[in-house]
Image: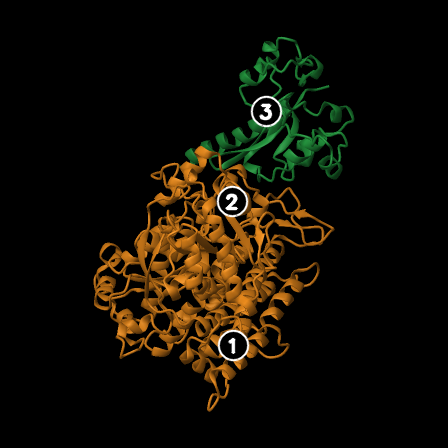
Chain colours: A orange, B green
Amino acid sequence: MLETKDKNLSKLAKKSVDPAAQEILKHAEAEGISTVWDRFKAMQPQCGFGLSGLCCRICHMGPCRISPFADGPQRGICGADADLMVTRNLTRQIAVGTSAHGDHARSVAHALILAAEGKGGYQIADEVKLHKLASEWGIKTDGRKKEEIAKEIGHLALEEFGKQEGTLRFINRVPKKRREIWEKYGLIPRAIDLEVSQTLNRTTIGVDNDYKNLIFAGIRTALANGWGGSMIATELQDIIFGRPRPIRSQVNLGVLKEDEVNVLVHGHEPVLSAMLVKASRDPEILAKAKASGAGGINLAGICCTANEIMMRYGIPIAGNYLHQELALITGAVEAMIVDVQCVIPSLTDLANCFHTEIITTSPKGKSIGSVYIEFHEENALQIAKEILMRAIKNYPNRQRNKVDIPKEKMDLVGGFSTEEVFTFLGGKYRATYRPLNDAIINGRLRGVAAIVGCNNPHFPQDYGHLEMAKALLKNDVLVVETGCSAIACAKYGMLKPEAAYEYAGRGLREICEAVGIPPILHLGACVDISRILTACVEVIKEGGLGVDFSDLPVAGAAPEWMSEKAITIAHYVIGTGIYTVLGGPLSILGSKNVTNFLCNEIEELLGGKFAFEPDPVKGAELMINHINKKRAALKLRPMMYQ
Amino acid sequence: MKKKAIVADIERCMACKTCEIMCAVAHSNSKELFSSMLEDQPPEKRISVEKAENFTVPLQCRHCEDAPCVSICPTKAMIKLGPGQAVILEKEKCIGCKMCILVCPFGVIKLDREGKAIIKCDLCIERLKEGKLPACVSSCPTKTLEFKEIEEFTKNVKEKALEKIISAFQDRKKK
């Protein structure tokens, strides 16, 4: 049902189109090492009740399943019909996604307070952003030290999770028209934890039995992520670690080194990974690495934490979500240090085939068979050094006959942000969104599309991201990416400025040439999708492209999504009024009403809606059609080069 | 007694694999879901849900009338209980030569988890004696699997075929 039906792909390419992944998969097969793709195959066929959302395990009168055929049960024991059953399941997933990014943001707020207190090795790297946020939140700055201001911001940020009254502070960033829409449908998010816990209550047996009412609760909970948890994480991370600026780096398994201590950091929170960067540059640690016979320490990342440290320090990226097992199978990794989210349970067993140590660091995310070194923000740098020492000690244990490092690595430019990305279009001394808006108004640029999200063995790894990006670029759509999507396109050289010559349509190419930017802009980790929201706000403020998100010639997509976080993100994006294409469908197809509501009717109410399209090229066509529709409604000029 | 067979309407299969679980339970010592999971020798399924193109198909022994597994068995361990009845394996006679596995045209005879004994669907003969349906049939939530008389099955197929013929005929007449 979900697989990409591209007949031209080889058997191996149907698993991953990345040659580095293919090399390691051949190696794994020869050695009898099982990977996510083997387990995926063993799981076929997958249960249709689960896929369609028609399975409910919420109360113990059940479990219940609703039959997709008229001659079977059409209601659960409690009386829930298909509409309610799929919606309860969906809203629970949204609440989980919001809690994931919220928890991430909470750690960052703690780290900011520590930075203010001079503890843990954290600093306040971006005073400009600190002052900007202070004035936005009404914090007095005159005559105060940056530490005092940071401390107050940190505490106010923590209040955003648990306050029992009022709405989220970042709602003030939302344009007036959108706020009115949210007010009308009761969508203005209150405290982050409050939204999560109330939504969970509403999905328990016998509370919210109106599926549309429950979907709106889900969307409000999702907005508490986009305009809450994720945005707090992005803003405070920028203050502590510095706002990303365009930076060169490299990506793919070829960044691992034969003659250095390879340390991978995998997970999501830069409060850990940024400290590992700092520790890996410590002269004492480097001397220890040399003493162990290695040429040095080679730190590289997997998943979003990789994006965080690539964007700020240029640390290379070893790969995206489905590269986590493959990186270990190279046999060249001394330690993989993990925190939370997307760290799959198979890693510890896999590491047992090699000398590799999996080092878990979070009391929230332990793994049987791992080495556990608890990370505390208070002693961050010290712990980071301890972890690196362990990796260095493990270097002599590397079994050279088991090492297979693919040669593939690619240059990339990343590190764009709301503050810097589009102002490039105006040049350093004319920092303004005007040139971007003008380019769209004049028809040089058709619009902007965001491609985000994960890898998923339902699809060939990276294929969806690549093919969708190619189709959009060709049609003069500027592409912005985050997370595993950005890593996917980076691996194939699409994040190099010269990629404009190969992939961009004429209008987009002219812009990339004039400014020297890649046709795909890497905006960071998955929490940094909040940067896309704030960039849209700036475009609206600049004028000429409407007064609301739903007026803009923009669209979003997650062609290979798999995580509950992606479900939440998808809902805050449509809740913000932006059309979104998902590769695999949400588990709602068991209800015609809910599917129709989220894929059609909701556009009338909120301006955004979903489309489910497994073919990435067709998905890109849907996005382009949507962008064209918005261009026509704004009466923009015809495209310059058609 | 009229002879019945397990038939599958593959358009209805949701791949939930309840049939697989309940088959294993029916062949456990306790015959009960949670206790069977704790048995020293966890029970094994005799049916499997397979994927082919866009369909999922529950597959098990067809209890062939002229069964190759029965013909080839050198110790007469594999026997047909009678016309229209089950093909079953008498364990004590089986020497584990695996010839039945080699000749089965559906690939539904297999070795057990330890690779020592042959196992296959026995049409739940014990359950049938108690007046129950085969476990896969009674547990199927979408009625993909049914235990039907062959005449009843063919009658339904004929009715569906006739509907198609008649509507095609009427369409042509309209033109």
Q: Report the chain holding disc 1.
A: A
Q: Position of residue A558 (x, y in %)?
A: 43, 56
**Seen from this angle, which residue lies furthest front?**
A291
Element assignment for label 3: helix
Graded by Cα atoms within 10 Å as few (under 14), some (14 to 19) or many (20 or more), the crowding at tag 3 reads: few
Identify the residue at image location x=61%, y=52%: A82
Q: Amino acid at mark 1?
A: Gly
The residue that mark 1 highlights is A118
Q: In the figure, A117 relative to A353: above or below?
A: below
Q: Position of residue A261 (x, y in %)?
A: 42, 52
Q: In the figure, A328 relative to A158: above or below?
A: above
**Mark 1–mark 2 distance (CA, rounded to whole Å):** 37 Å
Q: Amino acid at mark 2?
A: Ala
The residue that mark 3 highlights is B154
Q: In the figure, A637 relative to A354: above or below?
A: below
The residue that mark 2 highlights is A351
Do the residues at discs 2 and 3 belong to one chain?
no
